[in-house]
Amino acid sequence: MKKQGFDPIYQQITRVAETSSQRIQSKLSNPYLWCFCELCWRTTEYSTNLNSPLIIKHLLRGNAKIVGLTASARAAAIKKADAVVKRYEQALAGELGRYTASRLYAKYCDAVEMRGDRSVAGFRDCVERVTLYQEWAKNGELAWSTRKPGQDDKAAKPSKLYCEAHNPKRSDEARRAYQRDRRFMAEYESLMDAIWSQGINSGSLPTWDIEAHAYVRREAYRLLQEIKSPRAAASTIEELLAKGMSQAAIARELCVSRQAVSAAIKRHKHRATT
């Protein structure tokens, strides 16, 4: 008997993960935050990998191979999608009962990703992707790579918490970015709260829109970098020095190293003498 492939309905597979970490389980269960890096607006390595599934066919002696997407599978997927979309159009017209359209939408579409779009064109985009994976998966099993292209088996698995630029296991540069931005998580969250508060009051930032969440995180990160820039830091350091605070106390106040405070003071003195 031929082994049946996994039926890849997109919204049923994106946030499923086997882990005992309460932190990760809590993150993945949030429909608006699960895909974002903890320290910025970028998507996590894990969520990026979910957009690139593979179909694997098991062979004898435990071997396996990647199954390519054939023209016949594409044609079958389009034919199946056309039938589903036609049924959705009939349901919207009230020909198939009161709840049929909602059931089809819930089955094939991710409400968060759709951002409230219930049009036939938007529905078709989701259905075509789902039916394509369904037809493709008939030749094997749906799977996701646990490594990025070019990485060996010893490389760290895709992070569910951080993007490639902030995953400390990815590179020296990423580790430095992680250590730098992790110190300012409280300020980052405060800026996001302030932007959300202003946007909700003005009606410009709907909380159900995933793009609004991305905008808030990106804008808060930009503001944080401006606040923590050398020029802004130097101005703050000057004010704290005028109050009689020591370099060590200033470093603790600004959550930076004493070396950074010393360097900022030297730059200020150099500019003052030139």
Image (cartoon, rainbow, N blue to C red):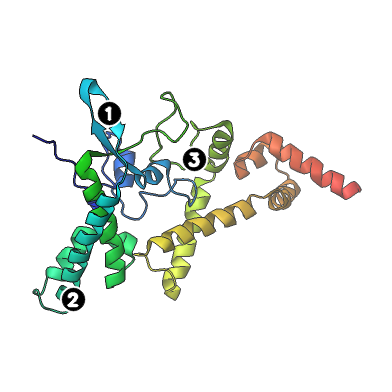
Give the crowd class for mark 2: few <14, some 14-19, many >=20 residues within 10 Å.
some
Q: Is residue 202 above or below residue 170?
A: below
Mark in front: 2 vs 3: 2
- Identified by mark 3, the residue type is Glu
The disc at residue 263 is none
Q: How far apart, in angstroms, are the residues tagged by discs 2 and 3?
A: 42 Å
In the picture of the structure, the residue carrying the numbered disc 3 is 164
Which residue sits furthest front? Answer: 72
Q: Residue at x 36, y 34 (%)?
A: 146
The answer to which of marks 3 and 1 sits earlier in the sequence is 1
Q: How far apart, in angstroms, are the residues tagged by discs 3 and 1?
A: 28 Å
Q: In this view of the protein, which residue sits in the foreground, 241 or 272? A: 272
Which residue sits furthest right? Answer: 274
Q: In this view of the protein, which residue sits in the foreground, 12 or 226? A: 12
Mark in front: 1 vs 2: 1
In the picture of the structure, the residue carrying the numbered disc 1 is 64
Q: Position of residue 43 (x, y in %)?
A: 44, 48
The answer to which of marks 2 and 3 sits earlier in the sequence is 2
In the picture of the structure, the residue carrying the numbered disc 2 is 92
Q: Is residue 60 above or below residue 138?
A: above
